[in-house]
Amino acid sequence: MTQGIASLLFAILLAGALPTRALAAPVARPLSFASVAQTALQDNLQLRAAAFDVAVAQAQLAQARGAKLPQANLSGSYTRNQEQPLLADPNVYAASLVVSYPLSTGGNLEARIRLAEANVRGAQATYERTKQQIVFAAEQTYLQALLAAESVAAAQRSLAVANESLRVAQVRFSAGAGARLDVLQAEVAVASAEQALVQAQTGVGNAQANLNALINLPLDTPLALTDTLTPRPVDIALADAIARALRERADLAALRNRIEAAQAGIDVAQSGGAPTFGFGAGYALSNANGLSTTIFGGWLVTLGVTLSVFDGGITQAQIREAQLQLEQLKLREAQIRQQVELDVRVAALALQRAAGELTAATKAVEQGRESVRLATVRYQSGVGTSLELLTAQSNLALAEQSLASARFNQNAARIQLILAMGSQ
């Protein structure tokens, strides 16, 4: 009796010494298809880099606008000279306040502002396109994880059917109504189904690790995907999709803003041959470089003009360079427009193909289930063979996997079309 009590106390102490974390399984984090995009955008390094590009462009715009405003400079100095007979005061004091304003720069400052504004819009468009690409990658990886989960479910169903077939074969063999070969074939089918299940479960682990990486979670975080590979229809005509893409694609908008910036760059270069006018006014205090012990003050007004008479052809070369850059960007725009239309057409064709595959795969699964039902009845009644039943089960497993793939392809083509149109 005493020994039993001691053993019980030892077991209690041992259980208490075990870490609580090891006893409790980690709770899976729920994740829906609708929320995966926003989750992926949170603290994304690629998106943060694009945001810095926007901030840099905005700072450059502020500099360009600031150059058109009046500039005020305050200066002061003190100098101690060696004492000399002619100097009334060896201490030299000077202070001045000067305000300058560019009356005209030949369009240079205005062109620089337009250039900077176009660069800001281009950076913002690039930022939006980066967001769209991140959303697409996250949603595509989510769909891949769903496909992996569907594969596991299909493998589990196949294993359950194989186990049932093995049970029936063993019962028939024990009753003398079946052959040993039927049992062996059923056992092989079970082993194959178990292997397929292991492979599918490994695929789930890989898919969830990839998804964790995209949404900035530890790679071993368990996820509970709350959606399924339900087909999501897209109701838009091809012509409307192409028109929308040409109108809304952010990368095309970024290139158009680069063209506007290049046009402003031509104006900047052309301003190099125009006269510039400036105005300045100020007030200065000094003791006349030490010639007086009294500090005097006076105002000043300046009106200046500058004209480049000869610069060795630099201005003309700069204009030519800017014009060539503009022509290059226009050619690039034509290429991008063609690529945008191609992206939409390819995605639309993929969506159309996926719809056909989905219809065919759904019908194949229905036929496969009916074939398994009939083969099972025939085998249990002694009319059919085990090979007939195993073939029907194998065909059903392939049909279910094809159906899952068709659902994935339909969803993947849908988000590909959304990305091609420049939407989110």
Image (cartoon, helix red, strand yellow):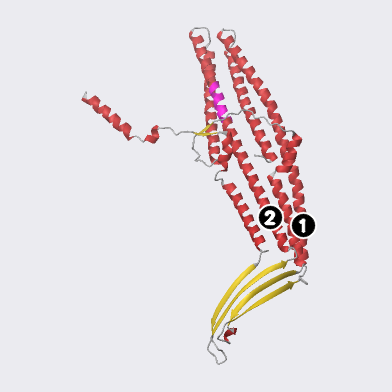
Number of numbered tags placed on the structure image: 2
- As for residue 23 lying within the magenta part, the answer is no
Instruction: Report the amino acid beneath label 2.
Output: Glu
Q: Position of residue 340 (x, y in %)?
A: 73, 42
**Left or right: 106 as drawn, with respect to 49:** right
When the figure is inspected, residue 393 is found, relative to residue 119, above or below; the finding is: above
Q: Which SS does the magenta portion mostly show?
A: helix
Camera-nearest residue between 50 and 4? 50
Residue placed farthest to the left in the image? 2
- Region in magenta: 147-157
Q: Residue at x 54, y 30 (%)?
A: 226
Tell me if residue 188 can be seen: no
Q: Upstream in the sequence, badge 1 or badge 2?
A: 2
* Quarter of the figure that contains the N terminus: top left
Q: Answer few, some or many: residues within 10 Å of disc 2's Cα (few below 14, many 20 plus, some between 14 and 19).
A: many
Camera-nearest residue between 151 and 327? 327
Q: Residue at x 68, y 23 (%)?
A: 360
Q: Which residue is mark 2?
A: 117
**Left or right: 363 as drawn, with respect to 217:** right
Camera-nearest residue between 347 and 197? 347
**Marks 1/2: CA distance?**
21 Å
- As for residue 152 lying within the magenta part, the answer is yes
When the figure is inspected, residue 387 is found, relative to residue 358, above or below; the finding is: above
Give the numbered dot on residue 74.
none
Q: Position of residue 260 (x, y in %)?
A: 73, 53
Q: Which residue is mark 1?
A: 324
Tell me if residue 395 can be seen: yes
Where is residue 189, by image quadrant?
top right
* Quarter of the figure that contains the C terminus: top right
Callout 2: helix, strand or loop? helix
Where is residue 96, by image quadrant?
bottom right
